[in-house]
Image (spheres, rainbow, N blue to C red):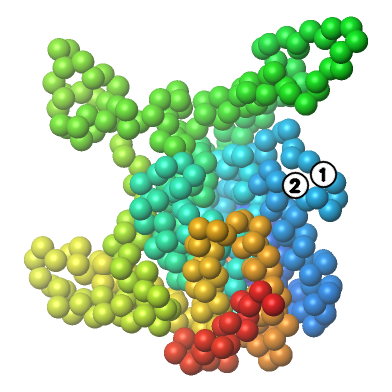
Amino acid sequence: EGESPSRGAGGPWGKHLSNSMKTLLHENYGEGLAVPIVSSGYDARGIYESGMHKHLDQLERKLMVPLISLSKAVRGSYDETINSSPSKVPLISIPNGLTSDSGYALLLGSYVLATHSTSLKILNPLRGLAFDPVGLSYLLPRLGWEFGQTSREYSKACGVLLALTGYEANAEDMVATGLATHYIGSPYKLNILERGLSELNSYAGQALRPKPKTLHGREQDNAYDVNEEFRNVAVGNLIQHISEYDAAGADEYGCYLQDDLDEEAGVFLKDKDPSITLAEERIQMYGEVFSEFVSWGATFQDALLEPTVEGIIARLEEIAATKAEFEGKSGCEEDVMVAEQAESLVSSMKQRSPLALRTMHRLLQQGAESDETLESCMEREKKSQMRLFAKEDGDFVRWAESGKGVGLAGMKSIASISKEKEETFSNWNHASVKEVTNDEVEEIVSDA
């Protein structure tokens, strides 16, 4: 489990509160307040307090290797060292809250069903750390690729935006980029899903074709499963039925929304017969799914694709400086909004460890290469993270000793039900990314 935002409050945002207290919290602060954190992977400060960061063999054996094995298992791969095989049962995740850093290992499975409370955020640079070994340096530069989404045109920019700026991608953002596979809206649909799954045939029973006959004296070929293409199709259909839409753009009936796009009206329609109704009179059944995350990635693409972190910050500062030029002018509201967003991103990046930012940016660049694999990126992430953990008087050690957090909101006290935001650390070894040398970065990310 990840560290609690408010260590004296008995867990994240009152994790162990009574039902009546949870109801009161929901009424005052919104549904989902009592359990907002799905997973941050592990307690980073606990690693420091146990002294594990000083013993690389323990750190690798007890944390890094298990994270890689978990990621491979959830992804559907296998670890040859334990002689295991891919699971026949698809893994379904419903992250009803915030997932961060290595917690994303739990969302690498066949189906990730996002609710209205689902979100993803990279917080490790606020701890002086980079990517955990779950493959994000491989996945982020390829956002939108798996499902052929529009976001693939801005995949590298969106990857940098999520990794370096602390941008929190919500449910719509995650589905729009393939970080989640389906959007179900309410987490209460879990009840329908559980009941539906319980009524499905077992994996062995999901067969439409009879097994091929075996003639006497001939060896039976058990390697080929004649029903392989039908296995787990019912699971996929059930998930599609409870979902509002999926990452590939299909609705709950499995119909792709883009197929119902009226080119003239620019809206999604179910009735496309012009002899019945005019385009402007037809009922708008579906609206285009909008992702602010992808929109910002497209808006700041040129800045985010600068070859250095220093260049990214400089370009964003240039955009932020235009606010004074447009503020107060009629018709320039959007320009002001863009400038303010750029200013916010710069501020967030400057709160983070400069060495961690440089390291993550380098890992993203390496992970984007065409010859890279998920496994090669996880191995590089493991080595880099271990070096950041073990660095004497490094940024991680400084953060851990400070007692400060990563800016999450927690409960100040159960009695007053007031929210308090954690303080973030700022006394890093480098005052800015300009002070971080290329040699320091290569020392961290080197494959040696």
Q: Residue, x 20% and y 63% (percent of image)?
A: 334
Decide if residue 371 is on the left or right side of residue 65. Answer: left
Q: Residue furthest front?
A: 217
Q: Which residue is label 2 attached to? A: 78
Of residues 64 and 198, the one nearer the viewer is 64
Q: CA distance from mark 1 to mark 2?
A: 6 Å
Indicate the position of residue 187 as horizontal and vertical percent values: 56, 40
Above or below — where is 49 with respect to 234? below
Q: Residue, x 32% and y 71% (percent of image)?
A: 303
Of residues 28 and 307, the one nearer the viewer is 307
- Is mark 1 in CB contact (under 8 Å) with mark 2? yes
Three-letter residue code for mark 1: Ser
Indicate the position of residue 29 as horizontal and vertical percent values: 50, 56
Quarter-of-image position of residue 200:
top right
Indicate the position of residue 60 as horizontal and vertical percent values: 79, 70
Q: Residue, x 45% and y 25% (percent of image)?
A: 254
Above or below — where is 249 with respect to 62? above
* Residue 42 appears anywhere in the view: yes
Q: Earlier in the sequence, mark 1 or mark 2?
A: 2
Q: Which residue is label 1 attached to? A: 84
Few, some or many residues within 10 Å of mark 1 (<14, 14–19, 20+): few
Of residues 364 and 423, the one nearer the viewer is 364
Three-letter residue code for mark 2: Tyr
